Amino acid sequence: MSQNQKGFTAVELLAPIGIIGILATVTTVSVSSIRAKGRDTKRVTDVKAIQSNLEIFAETNGGYPTTATKSVIEGLWMCNGDKAAAFKADADCVAANRIFRAPKNPAPGGATYKYLGEATAQTYKVYFKLEGDSASFKLGCNVATEKEIVKTAETDCN
């Protein structure tokens, strides 16, 4: 810049603006990834809590809850006393019988938590969806049973 001119040229202004834009993009992508991992951690924690409470139910009631079809359980109470209708809304579950309220999937991403209890009351499946891979769990639809958590077909989470 000569001594007679005041201010900056367009090129001098565009270079720092471009650098700031690149840094903002990288930061936004990093934050999005961290948020998705946080939601996935919450999902896995939720499912493990559901599994623990299913064990309590089975010990108290002689088996796991049974269902005719895969059912959404988010926000419902797991209630003692009736294996065929263990997941109930607030008004349908007497406070003394409440074991655990199933948590809701953290949004955005994922899918509603679904439960399928086999007719024998000796096994169950809890379906949930992850936004990314982790050391132990895989992107997409996963199923938790009384024994393990494994990847399953995407259509199972629908």
Image (cartoon, grey):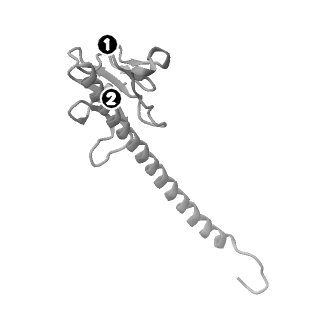
Instruction: Report the front residue among 9 and 130.
Output: 130
17 lies left or right of 92: right
Q: Quadrant of the N terminus?
A: bottom right
Q: Is residue 60 left or right of residue 74?
A: left
Residue in the picture at 26% in, 45% down: 136
Residue drawn 36% across the image and 44% down it: 132
Q: Residues within 10 Å of mark 1 (few under 14, many from 20)?
A: some
Along the line of sight, the residue nearer the viewer: 153 or 61: 61
Residue that label 2 marks: 127
Q: Position of residue 46 (x, y in %)?
A: 38, 36
The CA span between labels 1 and 2 is: 19 Å
Q: Is residue 69 above or below residue 111?
A: above
Which is more N-terminal, label 2 or label 1? 1
Q: How many marks?
A: 2
Residue 123: give x, y in percent of width and height.
Answer: 22, 23
Picture coordinates of residue 133 (x, y %)?
32, 45
Q: Which residue is mark 1?
A: 84
In depth, the one of 64 and 119 nearer the eye is 64
Mark identifier at residue 69:
none
